[in-house]
Image (cartoon, rainbow, N blue to C red):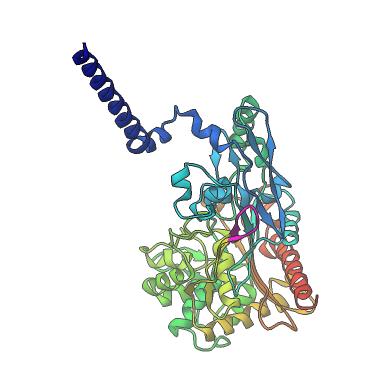
């Protein structure tokens, strides 16, 4: 009898060991695959079991959380959702996360190891901390000025601080309320269908993810290339560029909207936006020189993050002389995001250097302790400092005595460049209106802001579209607010 009891005990012990080994296998070896299994509802339940951290603008949260009383308990809410959607994105229980909600998801959800009180704490406890906060670089009043300026028209505004790279305003229009996507159910699915099928594409982030032909604003890049390459040594000297100008190897004549562009100087060409002069200079610099120059500004860069990913601004590396001529005035296959063109203006304002743009100033715990801070980084040296100083003078002249006069601000030095970009089959589409600029108060040591504005404005007639008329007033309003904020900071 005792022998049978011993055998039964040994079998029970063996079964117990097998159970422990299997439990260890499930918890250690298969834990990750089980966590990632779409059928595992516990992960989603745990994710939404507590409020998400906040996204902060000018010291105030622009997000919140609502107790839904459902199994997925806490839903995301947004204050002034359409105003801040281009930076916050959405955090949806049905459709996931985008923009800062996505880029900083671990901080906001409380799963980032940096939020834990001790190293490996989350791994040992298999838990998470209260969601942390993300403090952005956006200035609320500048964001509001840009949003009002576009007034629902299709387009975008980006404003950056040239010296630091801080993104001060990021607007895409028309926008949407990300709160309508936060939860689950038919209403959320209907909202998603409505937003994703709208011809106005309100969920498209035009500031970071849409590229446009930059038109004449690109002439600042071509001018920098010509000056750095020594093709132009005196900005006031004639360029020996005929008008009409025939594209190399073709019979196609490149027109000018401005008068007096025949053999005009680089200074005159920037002031009045002469196509022929800038196209001729691009051809003279040559394809290798132009490619090298534009890539110093950030074109063709697929790695830029702010921290959300940014679409690549394009300048072809292979093309013929006629295509190069068109590319040098921001046409052909040349495209740019509004952020990229704000970086062009910032390069001129910051003596040729582009500071890496960024949208998140710092991340913190729920109690406000700093977890990480974004430091200033140099992105590219776009041009020689001497070239930047010459372009500063030319852009100021374009505002004071040329096409950009609608951006002039009393008591400030403003440099700008207009652009009207053709697009569509046979250039029959309504042109895009561009304006890039920077502004420096008369009593300030350096420019306070660089800005890029693009207005698609499909409702307007072709003759009513111009960078100076449609986009410059929006840029002016944003720059005025930047100068006001800077003055308040200097004289509290």
**Residue under the point 48% across and 47% down:** 122
Residue 112, image x and y in percent? 51, 51
The quadrant of the image that shows the C terminus is bottom right
Residue 348, image x and y in percent? 58, 76
Main SS of the magenta part reads loop
Nearer to me, 258 or 288: 288
Task: Please tell me whether residue 428 is drawn above or below residue 182 in the rendered image.
Answer: below
The quadrant of the image that shows the N terminus is top left
| Residue span colored magenta | 363-370
| Furthest residue in direction top, as rendered | 1
In magenta segment, residue 366: yes
**Residue under the point 37% across and 35% down:** 27
Residue 446, image x and y in percent? 66, 80
| Residue 261 seen in the current view | no
**Residue under the point 64% across and 58% down:** 135
474 on left or right of 336: right
| Furthest residue in direction front, as rendered | 2
Nearer to me, 2 or 392: 2
230 on left or right of 97: left
**Residue under the point 76% across and 70% down:** 485
């Amino acid at each position: 009898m005792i022998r049978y009891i011993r055998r039964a005990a040994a079998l029970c012990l063996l079964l117990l060991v097998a159970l422990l080994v299997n439990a260890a296998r499930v918890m250690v070896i298969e834990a990750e695959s089980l966590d990632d299994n779409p059928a595992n509802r516990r992960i989603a339940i745990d994710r939404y079991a507590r409020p998400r951290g906040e996204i902060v603008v000018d010291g105030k949260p622009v997000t919140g959380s609502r107790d839904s009383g459902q199994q997925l308990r806490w839903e995301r809410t947004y204050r002034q959702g359409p105003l801040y959607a281009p930076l916050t994105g959405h955090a949806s229980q049905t459709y996931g996360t985008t923009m800062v909600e996505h880029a900083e998801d671990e901080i906001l959800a409380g799963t980032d190891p940096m939020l834990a009180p001790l190293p490996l704490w989350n791994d040992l406890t298999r838990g998470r901390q209260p969601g942390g906060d993300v403090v952005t670089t956006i200035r609320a009043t500048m964001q509001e000025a840009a949003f009002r300026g576009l007034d629902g028209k299709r387009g975008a505004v980006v404003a950056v601080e040239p010296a630091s790279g801080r993104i001060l305003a990021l607007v895409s229009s028309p926008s949407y309320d990300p709160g309508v996507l936060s939860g689950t159910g038919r209403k959320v699915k209907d909202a998603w269908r409505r937003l994703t099928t709208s011809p106005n594409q309100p969920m498209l982030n035009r500031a970071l993810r849409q590229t446009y032909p930059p038109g004449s604003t690109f002439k600042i890049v071509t001018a920098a290339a010509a000056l750095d390459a020594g093709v132009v040594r005196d900005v006031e000297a004639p360029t020996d560029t005929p008008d009409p100008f025939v594209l190399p190897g073709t019979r196609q004549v490149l027109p000018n909207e401005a008068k007096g562009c025949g053999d005009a100087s680089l200074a005159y060409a920037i002031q009045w936006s002469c196509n022929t002069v800038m196209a001729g200079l691009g051809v003279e610099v040559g394809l290798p020189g132009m490619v090298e120059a534009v890539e110093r500004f950030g074109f063709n860069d697929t790695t830029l993050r702010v921290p959300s990913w940014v679409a690549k601004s394009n300048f072809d590396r292979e093309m013929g002389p006629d295509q190069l001529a068109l590319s040098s005035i921001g046409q052909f296959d040349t495209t740019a995001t509004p952020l990229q063109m704000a970086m062009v203006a910032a390069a001129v304002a910051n003596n040729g250097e582009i500071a890496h743009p960024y949208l998140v100033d710092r991340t913190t715990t729920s109690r406000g302790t700093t977890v990480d801070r974004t430091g200033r980084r140099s992105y590219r040296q776009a041009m020689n400092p001497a070239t930047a100083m010459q372009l500063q003078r030319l852009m100021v002249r374009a505002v004071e005595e040329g096409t950009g006069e609608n951006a002039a601000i009393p008591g400030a030095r403003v440099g700008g460049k207009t652009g009207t970009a053709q697009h569509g089959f046979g250039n029959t589409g309504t042109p895009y209106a561009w304006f890039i600029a920077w502004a420096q108060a008369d009593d300030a040591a350096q420019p306070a802001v660089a800005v890029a504005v693009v207005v698609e404005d499909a409702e307007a007639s072709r003759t009513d579209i111009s960078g100076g008329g449609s986009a410059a007033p929006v840029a002016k309003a944003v720059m005025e607010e930047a100068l006001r904020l800077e003055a308040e900071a200097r004289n509290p």
